[in-house]
């Protein structure tokens, strides 16, 4: 097991300090993905949103600072080795938006950029007396598309 902090241990986060790469939608589990991916980069050219980029190991990862995923499936269609495997009824991934404490609204600054950008309307704002309305992610409604990520001026959105 990698060296992890006490906090990570208590949260059940055994990945250590290195987070798993954010792979394109319908990616197989990381070990199977790494085995299947030939690093052909076909998924990059197939993505109309251009959010798939290459990591230092020359494998595809998603960069939400470039835009959102529309779940068109073109990356999976282009993946001949089937490292990206679209299965009927299976979600593209289990990513959900998370709002960190550096959120402007949590600092009592009126900001609704993440909610305005969310096509699924999964980020709602709850009024607070004498304060800015606070954002809350409806996990059931969040698709993990990443539309909320780039517009956030405080970079308070993460997808995990």
Image (cartoon, helix red, strand yellow):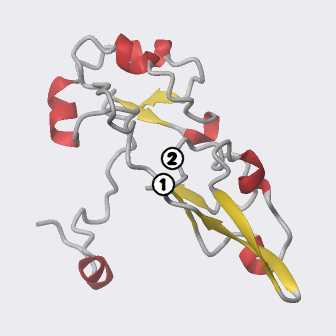
**Residue 35 location, quadrant:** top left
Above or below, 98 relative to 62: below
**Location of residue 11 in the rendering, given as x and y in whole percent from the top left corner:** 30, 78
**Location of residue 66 in the rendering, given as x and y in whole percent from the top left corner:** 63, 34
Helix, strand or loop status at disc 1: loop
Judge left or right: residue 138 versus residue 43: right
Above or below, 27 relative to 147: above
User: Which mark identifies residue 157?
Assistant: none
Q: CA distance from mark 2 to mark 1?
A: 5 Å
* Closer to the camera in the image, 73 or 152: 73
Badge 1 crowding class, 10 Å Cα cut-off, few under 14, some 14 to 19, many 20 or more, is many
**Location of residue 105 in the rendering, given as x and y in whole percent from the top left corner:** 77, 72
Circles 2, 1 touching at the beta carbon (< 8 Å): yes
**Location of residue 129 in the rendering, given as x and y in whole percent from the top left corner:** 84, 88
User: Which mark identifies residue 96?
Assistant: 1
Residue found at x 86% / y 70%: 110
**Residue 130 location, quadrant:** bottom right
Judge left or right: residue 118 versus residue 40: right
Badge 2 crowding class, 10 Å Cα cut-off, few under 14, some 14 to 19, many 20 or more, is many
Which residue is under mark 2? 144
The quarter of the rendered structure image containing the C terminus is bottom left
* Closer to the camera in the image, 31 or 1: 31
The quarter of the rendered structure image containing the N terminus is bottom left
Q: Answer whether residue 118 is visible to the viewer in this image.
A: yes
Residue found at x 48% / y 28%: 52
Q: Disc 2 or 1, which lies upstream in sequence? A: 1
* Closer to the camera in the image, 112 or 158: 112
Helix, strand or loop status at disc 2: loop
**Residue 128 location, quadrant:** bottom right
Judge left or right: residue 11 versus residue 95: left
């Amino acid at each position: 097991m990698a060296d992890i902090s006490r906090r990570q241990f208590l949260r059940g986060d055994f990945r250590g300090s290195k987070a798993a790469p954010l792979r394109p939608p319908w990616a197989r589990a990381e070990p199977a993905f790494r085995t299947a991916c030939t690093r052909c980069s076909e998924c990059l050219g197939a993505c109309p949103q251009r959010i798939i980029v290459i990591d230092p190991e020359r494998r595809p990862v998603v960069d939400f600072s470039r835009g959102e995923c529309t779940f068109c499936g073109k990356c999976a269609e282009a993946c001949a080795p089937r490292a990206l495997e679209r299965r009927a009824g299976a979600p593209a991934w289990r990513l959900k938006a998370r709002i960190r404490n550096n959120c402007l609204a949590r600092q009592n600054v009126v900001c609704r950029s993440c909610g305005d950008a969310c096509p699924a309307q999964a980020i709602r704002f709850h009024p607070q007396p004498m304060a800015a309305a606070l954002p809350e992610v409806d996990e059931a409604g969040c698709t993990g598309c990443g539309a909320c990520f780039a517009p956030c001026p405080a970079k308070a959105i993460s997808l995990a």
